[in-house]
Amino acid sequence: MLAPALVGNKKWTLEQLRQLVGSADSAGSQRPRRSCSLYPEGLPLRSLVEVSGCGKTQFAVQFIQEQASAPVAWIEDPRRAAQGSINPFGLWQMNLDLQQITFIETMQVEWATQQVLQSQLFPIVICSELLFHEKILRKFQLFVEKYEGLFLLLSSEVHQSWVPALQLQVQRSTHGLSARTLRRRGVG
Amino acid sequence: MKVLCYFFPNDVDVQLLGDIFYQYTPQMAFRGRRALLLEVSKGRKLYSAEHIQARGLVYLKKLMILCRSSLATDAPTALALAAFNKSHFQQLPLESLIFFVSPFRTDEFLEKQLAQMILYFQKLGLRYLKDVQTLSRASLSARFGTLGGLIHQNLLSASDLLWPVYVPNEVVEEKVEFDFEYPVHNTEPILFYLKTILEKIAWRLRGQGKRLKSFYLEFKLENKDRSGSDLRRISISLSNGILSPKMIFAIAREQMDHQIRQNPFTARISAFRLVVQDHTPFSVSQRDLFDPKNEEDEEGYASLVSRMRIRLGDQAVFKASAVQSYIPELNWQKQQHNQLKSSLQSVAESREREFLPRRPLRLFKMPIPVQAIAGFILWNGQSVALNPQGQEIIFSDWWNEKTERIYFRLKTQTQEILWLFKCQDQFFIHGVFD
């Protein structure tokens, strides 16, 4: 709670108050963004972004393509591949440079993701089809906030979690892929 | 011609120094185990002689080797200046004549002959080498025979001396023996020595333009273990070759700890040796002083991959490359080559990208059999009409059992695109165009 002396008699706007408590900073809108043609606002850096819906992998691939050879870590758990494991040949057919991507296939996903995020070597970290506990997601969020990274979580169904800074729903139509915002943390 | 000489008051490991200094010049020679001579004028466009001298002193200091160094225009003068700690030829005493007679090897017989000659010179009132230079060849030869002639010739034209050929070591190996009365029972002392040894190994390989890729540590145990051997070997792999001794040590320590935890020593250790198994060439490039992040990232990446492989297994972390094959599960392979940003090109030709129909981004490791009933299949709780699109027939390779798969796409009500195939009247879902 803010001290009355700090607020005083001045009429504060909601946005000013949010900035005062740092909420605006923790929200995605104030952060630098990585451009993404499928999501014109761009994806906020130092954030956890959840992408769901049919075409989420294609969304991720197109996003990687636009990031000019930034190293990518792609983490998967072979046990939880409800929609199959990633097919590197399919990525290559979409003109992706496979040397850009380090694949990690493990059942110890939590440990592997933590190592990858702590190393701060990968501007883009992708985890697909993984269910993490809220606390674990929060931990990952704190790690990714420490560098100019972006943690993309590809899920079949949207997490009911407050941790992702942005939750996107990808849809496939006759015009191609489109992404709409499901939820955004903080202002904006 | 410029010759750099390091003169050591105590015996040194000449192989170690030879490997380290090989990066500056291949023309080097040793005089016993007490002096190292380097002909450094050929590489003057890369390094000045003074620069090599200073760097050499840093290496020797790190190795805790005491030495005196000197620079001269020929090998005997450089040796004599370093040995007698003088700065000018004019100051060299008569005793330095030995270096002019035999600069590249020690010879006791010659030394005795020279001692007598020096006594004669002293009786004649000569004190310095410069005084001997004033004597004519005829007088020296007449009094001292061929040795006199040799001294006159070498004093006048020492730079024309023929240098022996230096051959670098093929096998790089370092060994540590613990005190016989106090064998080691934990890894702490081993790690203490390992750090120094790895530094030496990394320098030696660097001198030969290589970097360490894999090595093994062989421990000599005090008693035989359960397998009946008193030798225990631990292999360390460094994925893509690492230059930095600090990084090699960190990875080696992790891998060693992991292997010892799994299979502890059953006896105390009396000695161990490190043998380099594999190395890769590295190109010397200028360090980017303004953006050293790339180099740090590569080292950090090697460390991360190594750490993950220890815990998750060798196959868990990989890069992939495309392979020419029509069989969907066979058209990519894991690569063990590891660099954060690799310049390797994909094996398959680029035209194959367009030649093969688009494959799904997700594949099942094992195709999932589905039942087709009345023109529908059941997938994730929804019935999907068998309305095939984009048919493609794939045959197995001729050398395998003959099978035919008819692939097609199916669109579900939730806009999901499945990749199915029919094989012997059975339907399988092989992937999802996610």
Image: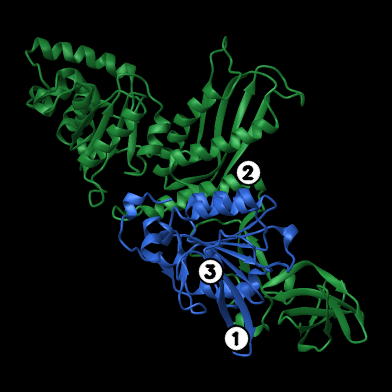
Which residue is the site of mark 3?
Answer: B345
Q: Are discs 3 and 1 located on one and the same chain? A: no
User: Mark 2 or mark 3: which comes first in sequence?
Assistant: 2
* Chain letter, blue: A
Q: CA distance from mark 1 to mark 2?
A: 42 Å
User: Which residue position is annotated with label 1?
Assistant: A176
Q: Residue type at mark 2: give it.
A: Ile
Q: Secondary structure at mark 2?
A: helix
Q: Position of residue A6 (x, y in %)?
A: 32, 52
Figure chain in green: B
Badge 1: how crowded within 10 Å, few (<14), some, or many (20+)? few
Tag 3: amino acid: Gln
| CA–CA distance in space, label 3 to label 1 | 30 Å
Residue drawn at 65 percent across, 71 percent down: B323
The type of residue carrying mark 1 is Gly
Which tag is nearer the camera, tag 1 or tag 2? 1
**Residue drawn where x is 6% and y is 26% of the image:** B134
- Which quadrant would residue B394 be assigned to in this image? bottom right
What x and y, as percent, mark residue B419?
Answer: 76, 79
Residue B276 in picture, x, y percent from top left: 54, 39
Dot label at residue B310: 2
Vertically, is B225 above or below B421? above
| Tag 1 and tag 2 share a subunit | no
The reply to whether dot 3 and dot 1 touch (C-beta < 8 Å) is no
The chain containing the residue under callout 2 comes to B
